[in-house]
Amino acid sequence: MNNRKVQHIEAALNQEIGKNSFDDMILNHYSIPKYNYNDIDISTVLTNFKIEAPFFINAMTGGSLKSKEINEKLAYIANKTKIPLASGSYSPALKDEKYKQDYLVIKEKSGGIFISNIGVDKDYTLALKTLSETKCDILQIHLNTLQELIMSEGETNFNEWKNNLIKIKENIKIPLIIKEVGFGMSEESIAELLQIGFDWIDISGFGGTNFAYIENLRIDNKMQYLNNWGISTVISLINSQKFQDKANFIASGGIRNPLDIVKSLILGAKCVGISGHILKLLKKYDIDKVVDIINSYKIEIKKIMCLLNCKNINELKNVKYYFINETYQILTQKKKV
Ligand SMILES: Cc1cc2nc3c(=O)[nH]c(=O)nc-3n(C[C@H](O)[C@H](O)[C@H](O)COP(=O)(O)O)c2cc1C
C-alpha cells in the first residue's frame, strides 16, 4: 500500500498534461463591460457549505510517509487560502491504524471544510467508521473501475458496488459526493447515480491525471492501449447538463488555471476540484508561493467574469461558447445517435 501511494504521486508528477478538452472551448468576447471588478461575487456552494471561491483541492493522498508530508502541506495551503480540502482514500487507515494520522493532520491543520474519501468497494459500515474516525464534513465515494482492472493487485469483483452505493446513501447522514477518478461520466452513469439518490456528482473527466497511464507504468505498460480511455471533462459536463436541474455537478480532471475553472462553471458545474496541478505547483514552488498562486486564482476568476459580463456564478450559464477540434467532432456524432 505504502509503496503504491508513493508511486502514484511520483507518476502523477511526471505525467505531462498538455492540451485538453478545455482548449476546444472558445468563449464569446464582450467589448463593453457591464460590471466593475468589485461587483463580482465568486462564492458558491459545496453540498451544505457556502464557500468563498468556486474551487477546492480534490482527493489525492494518504497512506505513506510521503503522503503525510504532502497532506500537511495541502492543509497549510487550505488554511491560508480558505478553500476546502479532500484527502485521498481512507482505505490505508481502515487496514492499518498507523496511517490514521496522515488524514487527521488535515482536520487539525486546515481548519476548514474537510472531505474524506473512500472507494465504492467499501460497505457502509466502513463508511461510518471513516466518518467517526476522521470527523469529516463531507464524504466522497470514488468510482475507479478502470484503475482496479489495470492494477495487478486490483479488484475484480464488482457485484457489491451498486449495493454499497445504495446502503451508503441510506445510512450516511453527512453530505456525500460521488466521484470518478479522471475517466469522466456518461449520461447513463449519471442517470444511474441519480436514481440511487446521489445529488452531488464529481464527473472527474479525462484530460488531467491519468490513472490508466499511472497504473500501466507499474505493470510495465502491459495495457498501455487503454491510456486514452475516458470521457473528457468538457464532454462529461455536457453529459451532465440534462440532469443539472435535478442534481449538482462538480468538475474535475485536468484543471490547469482559472480559465479552466470558469469554463467548467459556464458548463454548469457548481464547483471545481483540482488535484494533479496543485501537486505540481508544490513540487515547483515553495509553499507560500503556492498559497499566493491559489489566492491569485480568486482574483483572476473575478477578472475573467468581468470580461464575460457576469456578476455571479449563476450568470456564467448565460455565456455563449463554441467548440472546435475533437470536442466539436464528438458532439456532432453525439447529436446523430
Ligand atoms: C496522486 C493522486 C492520488 C489520487 N488518489 C485519489 C484517491 O485516493 N481517491 C480519489 O477519489 N481520487 C484520487 N485521485 C484522483 C483525483 O481526485 C482526480 O479525480 C483526478 O486526479 C483528476 O483530477 P486532476 O486532473 O486535477 O488530477 C488522485 C489523484 C492524484 C494526482
Image: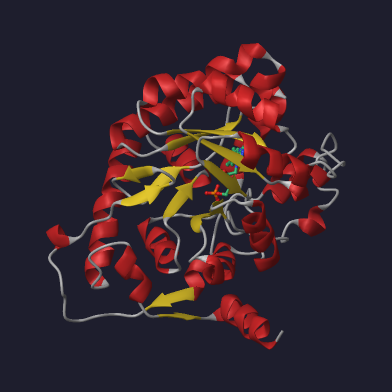
Q: Residue at x 45, y 68 (%)?
A: 267
> Does residue 183 appear anywhere in the picture?
no
**Residue 33 sits in quarter:** bottom left
Q: Residue at x 44, y 46 (%)?
A: 47
Looking at the rendered structure, the number of numbered marks drawn on it comes to 0
Left or right: 309 as drawn, with respect to 91: left
Question: Looking at the image, which is closer to me, 266 or 121?
Answer: 121
Image spot of residue 273 (x, y percent): 47, 48
Taking the image in four quarters, ligand 1 sits in the one at top right
Image spot of residue 106 (x, y percent): 45, 24
Q: Residue at x 74, y 43 (%)?
A: 215
Decide: is 171 above or below 30.
Answer: above
The N terminus, quarter of image: top right
- Which residue is the extreme one toward the bottom? 336
Left or right: 23 as drawn, with respect to 209: left
Image spot of residue 132 (x, y percent): 55, 20
Question: Looking at the image, which is closer to me, 35 or 240?
Answer: 240
Left or right: 108 as drawn, with respect to 150: left
Left or right: 317 as drawn, with respect to 37: right
> Does residue 2 appear anywhere in the picture?
yes
